[in-house]
Amino acid sequence: MTGDIGLEPLHRHALIRTSSAEVLRDLASRKLGAERVDFRNAERFEAIVNLIELQTIGLAFGTTTCDMVSDHRTADFLRVQISLRGRAVSCARGEATDVNEHQFAVAPAGMPWQMACQGGHRRLTLRLDPQALRQRLTALVGVQPRTDYTIEAAIPAADPQARSLQRLLDFLITQLSEQDAVFPAAVYRELEDAVHVAFLCASRHRFRDALIDPSPMPDFGLVKRLEDYIEANWHEAITIERLADEAGVSARSIFRVFERVRGYSPMAFVKSVRLRRAHEMLRSGDPSVTVAVAAAACNFANAGHFARYYRATFGELPSATIARAERR
């Protein structure tokens, strides 16, 4: 992904070209979520930012002639920084990650982020919707990951999956940069999906092996089967022994598999299903449904414990849910 001046990546989608540091500061605050932008050795200042946002991804190219440090507010998208020339450092979660020819950097959504770039550094930023990523990952592995599954901050650029991601981005950027290379919208949606899959294969997280290795992953299938069983029998007494009998494995194995795949215990999943069912009952507006009735129907023996679990999950007491349903 290289380019001459004036023909840099995404040049047809220019956001700004300026020789004023103040103009770039203003734009970075309004359009790029920056709280602070500082420059060093900015006597002969030049900056270029190109940006295009598709349905579930965004692509940006940026370069400045001087050193730059920027602090960014939390964003609802994940950032992948790829160096085209020079070096930068990405800082998030208290961790500094080099962005250079040897590795990409990943900054998570939902937390502040800092970027420090050397003068002359040319970088590509890939923005990804975390919800779209999670949906794609669920479809690929057959099990919904927990919301806070962690993606590591560094991706080795020499990894075959990382090279595949970069080649795919090269192709997409070429299409978006050429006047006579316009795809129908449906093709761009397919390319966005391909970028999601390529990123999931290139990045480091607990599900990567399941995506890279084509062999069956019995752990995922076992968890899905037990989750379906729990969903179908939530109103009955479900114990770990009953789940072990259903699965044909030991109780210890079930705990280990759930922890490895989901990050919590099978009984925590049972409780979450029952709380969801209780929530549906309390929102129904049925005058015969009281807090005690919902608790008993969903196998919560202690109404006080039920109310505490319910509030922790839904942010209000079950009595408040009933009152709101009555006002509708």
Image (cartoon, grey):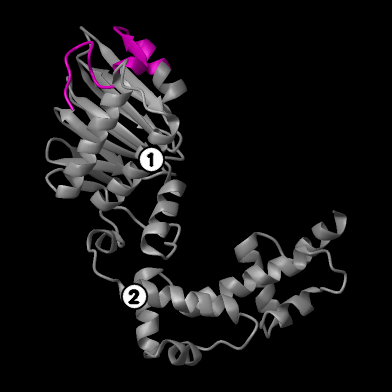
Quadrant hosting residue 36: top left
Q: CA distance from mark 1 to mark 2?
A: 30 Å
Image height of 188 relative to 269, above or below? above
Magenta-span inclusion, residue 89:
no
Image height of 14 relative to 280, above or below? above
Magenta-span inclusion, residue 7:
yes
Kind of residue at disc 2: Asp
Kind of residue at disc 1: Glu
In percent of width and height, residue 327 lies at 86, 55
| Viewer-closest of 25 and 277 | 277
Which of the labelled discs sits on residue 190, or is there none? 1
Report if residue 57 is visible in the image: no
231 lies left or right of 189: right
In percent of width and height, residue 80 lies at 29, 39
Disc 1 versus disc 2: nearer the observer? 1
Residue at 42%, 40% in the rendered image: 77
Q: Secondary structure at mark 2?
A: helix
Residue range corresponding to the magenta coloring: 1-26
Report if residue 193 is visible in the image: yes
Residue at 11%, 45% in the rendered image: 158
| Viewer-closest of 63 and 241 | 241
88 lies left or right of 239: left
Quadrant hosting residue 222: bottom left
Q: Secondary structure at mark 1?
A: helix
Rate crowding at label 1 as few (under 14), some (14 to 19) or many (20 or more) other CA atoms within 10 Å. few
Identify the residue position indicated by label 2 in the image.
219
In percent of width and height, residue 268 lies at 51, 75
Residue at 32%, 49% in the rendered image: 197
